Structures are given as structure tokens and as C-alpha cells.
Image: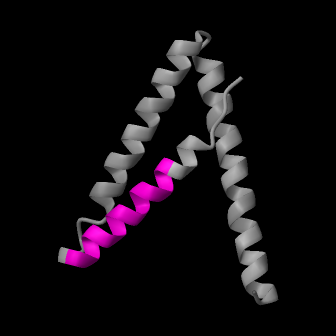
């Protein structure tokens, strides 16, 4: 991996960690009950998936399906990594 690619990967990873913590804090702050927290996180995940599906609407055919599929996989991975204690 080149130094530039390594730096770019480190930045993306750091931003994902920061964003995961922000989402977890928001959910915890607005939902005192653990079941409510899980439900809120699920709603956020669903809203993000819907936005991902709509954001690629300018593309056509296989390109749209591939991009949407990749975005949904990234979102699933991101939300699985969020832990609320």
C-alpha cells in the first residue's frame, strides 16, 4: 500500500469511528430505554438504506444495481459496528 493510500484508508477508518460514536451518543441521549435505543438505531439504518437506494436513481441498469448493492453492504457493516452501552 502506498503512503497516500495508507493515509486515505486511515482517514476513512477514523471518520467511520467518529461517526459511529456520534450516532451511538445521539441514540443513547434521545432513547433512555435499551429497547427504544435499538429501535431508533434500526430506524436510522432503514432511513440510510432508503436514501442510498434513492441517491443512485440517476444511474441506469447494472451500474445502479452494483452501486446500490455496495452502498447497502457498507451501511450494514457500519451499523453492525455501533455499540450502545
Quick check: 31 above or below 51? above
On the question of residue 68 being in view, the answer is yes
Q: Count all numbered tags in the image, as a single digit.
A: 0
| Relative image position of residue 14 (x, y in whole percent) | 75, 58
Quick check: 83 above or below 66? above
Q: Image check: 80 left or right of 20?
A: left
Residue ID at (64%, 22%): 28
Q: Which sits in the foreground, 79 or 52?
A: 79
Magenta portion: prevailing SS class? helix
Residue ID at (56%, 49%): 78
Membership of 53 in magenta stretch: no
Q: Quadrant of the C terminus?
A: top right
**Extreme right residue here?**
3
The colour mode here is one colour
Quick check: 8 above or below 85? below
**Extreme bottom residue here?**
2
Q: Quadrant of the N terminus?
A: bottom right
> Which quarter of the picture shows residue 24?
top right
Q: Image check: 3 left or right of 29?
A: right
| Relative image position of residue 31 (x, y in whole percent) | 57, 16
Residue ID at (67%, 27%): 84
> Which quarter of the picture shows residue 46?
top left
**Extreme top residue here?**
33
| Relative image position of residue 6 (x, y in whole percent) | 77, 79
On the question of residue 60 being in view, the answer is no
Q: Which residues are magenta?
A: 62-76
Membership of 66 in magenta stretch: yes
Amino acid at each position: 500500500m502506498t503512503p497516500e493510500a495508507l493515509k486515505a484508508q486511515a482517514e476513512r477508518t477514523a471518520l467511520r469511528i467518529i461517526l459511529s460514536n456520534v450516532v451511538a451518543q445521539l441514540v443513547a441521549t434521545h432513547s433512555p430505554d435499551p429497547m427504544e435505543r435499538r429501535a431508533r438505531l434500526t430506524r436510522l439504518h432503514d432511513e440510510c438504506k432508503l436514501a442510498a437506494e434513492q441517491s443512485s436513481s440517476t444511474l441506469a441498469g447494472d451500474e445502479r444495481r452494483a452501486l446500490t448493492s455496495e452502498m447497502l453492504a457498507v451501511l450494514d457493516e457500519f451499523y453492525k459496528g455501533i455499540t450502545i452501552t
